[in-house]
Image: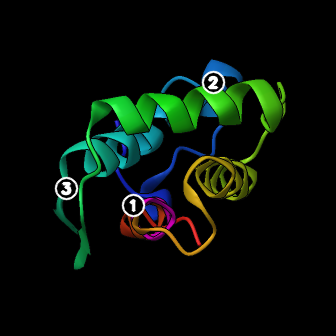
Amino acid sequence: DPDHYSKRYTGTSDNGGVHTNSGIINKQAYLLANGGTHSGVTVTGIGKDKLGAIYYRANTQYFTQSTTFSQARAGAVQAAADLYGATSAEVAAVKQSFSAVGIN
């Protein structure tokens, strides 16, 4: 499965790659929780609990059935800002983690 947006599947199988391309968000979430460097971008991890809180809020408040990768970034950033403040380290980490997988 791809771990960067530039490597995403763009064919017609798997409903346009919805399952195949989930590897990109899986990598983003891993980096957000645990930290690390991917594609030259260093991410400061925030832990699984904060990751879960951010994604719960994003899923219940901002994501829809047709959310795109860029909309997922925007929703996750907004969810982190709602929970921790717009200038928080958590918001910075969310942005870093999406940048690391090529979603800007």
Secondary structure mostly seen in magenta is helix
Secondary structure of residue under mark 1: helix
Residue 72 position, x and y percent, is 67, 47
Residue beneath disc 3: 35
Name the residue nearer the viewer: 32 or 70.
Answer: 32
Q: CA distance from mark 1 to mark 3?
A: 8 Å
Q: Are marks 2 and 3 in contact (CB under 8 Å)?
A: no
Q: Position of residue 46 (x, y in %)?
A: 29, 50
Residue with the mark numbered 2: 13
Q: Residue at x 49, y 58 (%)?
A: 5
| Mark in the foreground, 2 or 3 | 3
Q: Residues within 10 Å of mark 1 (few under 14, many from 20)?
A: many
Amino acid type at image mark 1 = Ser
User: Residue under circle 1?
Assistant: 97
Asked if the magenta segment contains residue 13, the reply would be no
Gap between marks 2 and 3 measured at Cα: 32 Å
Image side of residue 79 versus residue 36, left or right: right
* Horizontal side of residue 101 vs 64, given as left or right: left
Tell me the magenta residue range: 90-95
Residue 55's spot in the image, x, y percent?
56, 33
Which residue is at a point 40% across and 69% down the rendered structure image? 96
